[in-house]
Image (cartoon, rainbow, N blue to C red):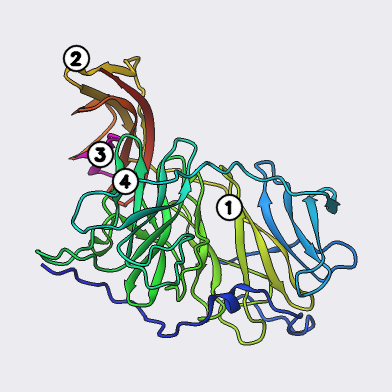
């Protein structure tokens, strides 16, 4: 059966990304006549962090786990000269000599491509996590280095680990014998759980922001991808990010040239990130702003906002704290059991024990184990609460992260993991 494309509003304009990516060159609007942020009643409004003395524009590019913000301040609208700043809630903005950089996990120089179908030309790595898991794009043609998302590439997002190799996580293909890929997707960010944030073309020229997990998606048309934006996108900016609490930031909705920043989380849904007085859809202020970075395990988001009367200033969005009350809970180590098995002694068979709870219960439940070697096992149960297991046979040595997922009937889910070593 051919792939059935979902119906979305198609923005049929392909504007230059460079022009969309720059803040306004001068303040717009009159601070005495602010426009209310009525695009969404649940929008999160930015805090204006200001600029260094004498400067006209700024942007925040990094936020630490304890809430210290770093960024750049500019003396002119042409981005020169530039100074670096640190901002704290108690001390405000002060100049510093440099901006701390979060750890950049190394990308592999090359990756093997999976076997056909189709005949992929190469795998282009774009992001990695601390465990050596990688995401990026599998290309058939025009796989330039560095990868250009605006080019005519035919590509699918992938996830790689040493145990699983390169896996195409976008399973849209045509009918045999050609098996040409349908649609395009890019993997741009990967968190500690191996979850991928990226872009997904549901129709030609209309990418949206998505999160991929091993769980089956709620919408069968998306496979294991979840649409997380506030609206459809028009350009793949390659700046969507996912952190370790599965919080995704990106740009979606708004005008074609001026999309809105947004944040999404399983317990939060999608929320617009706006500047006070500037709607997502507006003719007066241009781009509402852009989310550039977020905490790794927290919820704070930073970037720049377009503030009426002053223009583009560094912005801080205080996203609500994680609240997964009522979500399932899962423990992948409920008892003391081995974290090493031997192929020769056990034949590679491994039992993953886990215990799941939820109050109040909301069954039936989907229980899925990602074995870390490219395979998964899943089953349904009416209720949870007792220690149970699923088993799997490994066929090669190595280190594998086994991840246990529990999803309830309302789509709420939890994950826990365990490190397994398989010896000869």
At label 1, counting other C-alpha atoms closer than 10 Å, the crowd grade (few under 14, some 14-19, many 20 or more) is few
Q: CA distance from mark 2 to mark 3?
A: 29 Å
Helix or strand or loop: what does disc 1 sit on? loop
Q: Which mark is residue 112?
A: 4
User: Horizontal placement of 131 versus 153: left or right?
Assistant: right
Badge 4, how many Cα within 10 Å: few under 14, some, many 20+?
few
Q: Is residue 23 left or right of residue 261?
A: right
Magenta residue check for 374: yes
Q: Residue at x 22, y 44 (%)?
A: 364
Q: Residues within 10 Å of mark 2 (few under 14, many from 20)?
A: few
Question: For numbered disc 2, what is the local secondary structure?
Answer: helix
Image height of 253 relative to 316, above or below: below
| Residue behind mark 3 | 367
Q: Earlier in the sequence, mark 2 or mark 3?
A: 2
Residue 416 location, x and y as percent?
Answer: 38, 34
For the residues bearing labels 1 and 4, Cβ distance under 8 angstroms? no
Looking at the rendered image, the disc whose residue lies closer to the viewer, 1 or 3, is 3
Rendering coords of residue 370 (x, y %): 29, 38
**CA separation, marks 1 and 4?**
41 Å
- The residue tagged 2 is 344
Percent of width and height locating residue 122: 34, 55
Determine the secondary structure under disc 4.
loop
Question: What residue is pinned by disc 1?
Answer: 320
Q: Secondary structure at mark 3?
A: strand
Quadrant position of residue 326: top left
Up-down relation of residue 223 to residue 191 (above or below): below
Which range is magenta? 362-378
């Amino acid at each position: 059966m051919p792939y059935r494309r979902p119906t979305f509003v198609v923005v049929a304009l392909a504007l230059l990304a460079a022009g969309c990516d720059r803040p306004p060159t001068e303040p717009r609007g009159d601070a005495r006549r602010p426009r209310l942020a009525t695009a969404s009643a649940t929008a999160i409004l930015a805090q204006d962090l200001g600029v260094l003395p004498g400067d006209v524009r700024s942007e925040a590019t990094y936020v630490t786990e304890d809430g210290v913000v770093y960024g750049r301040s500019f003396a002119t609208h042409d981005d020169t000269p530039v100074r670096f700043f640190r901002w704290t809630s108690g001390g405000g903005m002060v100049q510093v000599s440099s901006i701390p950089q979060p750890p950049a996990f190394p990308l592999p120089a090359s990756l093997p491509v999976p076997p056909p179908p189709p005949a992929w030309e190469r795998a282009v790595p774009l992001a990695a996590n601390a465990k050596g898991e990688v995401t990026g794009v599998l290309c058939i043609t025009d796989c330039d280095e560095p990868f250009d998302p605006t080019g005519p590439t035919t590509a699918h997002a992938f996830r790689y680990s040493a145990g699983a190799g390169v896996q195409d996580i976008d399973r849209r293909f045509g009918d045999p014998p050609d098996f040409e890929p349908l649609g395009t997707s890019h993997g741009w960010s990967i968190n500690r759980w191996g979850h991928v944030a990226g872009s997904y073309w549901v129709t030609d020229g209309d990418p949206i922001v998505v999160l991929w997990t091993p769980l089956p998606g709620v919408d069968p048309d998306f496979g294991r991808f979840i649409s997380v934006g506030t609206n459809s996108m028009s350009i793949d900016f390659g700046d969507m990010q996912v952190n370790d609490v599965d919080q995704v930031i990106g740009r979606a909705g708004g005008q074609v040239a001026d999309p809105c920043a947004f944040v999404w989380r399983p317990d939060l849904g999608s929320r617009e990130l706006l500047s006070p007085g500037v709607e997502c859809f507006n003719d007066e202020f241009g781009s509402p702003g852009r989310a550039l970075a977020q905490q790794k395990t927290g919820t704070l988001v930073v970037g720049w906002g377009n503030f009426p009367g002053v223009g583009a200033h560094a912005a801080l969005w205080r996203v609500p704290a994680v609240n997964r009350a009522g979500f399932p809970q899962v423990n992948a180590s409920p008892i003391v059991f081995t974290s090493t098995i031997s192929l020769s002694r056990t034949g590679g068979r491994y039992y993953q024990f886990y215990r799941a709870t939820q109050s109040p219960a909301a069954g039936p439940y989907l229980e899925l184990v990602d074995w870390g070697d490219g395979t998964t096992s899943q089953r349904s149960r009416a209720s949870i609460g007792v220690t149970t297991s699923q088993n799997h046979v490994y066929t090669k040595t190595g280190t594998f992260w086994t991840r246990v997922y529990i999803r309830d009937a309302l789509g709420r889910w939890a994950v826990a993991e365990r490190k397994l070593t398989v010896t000869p």
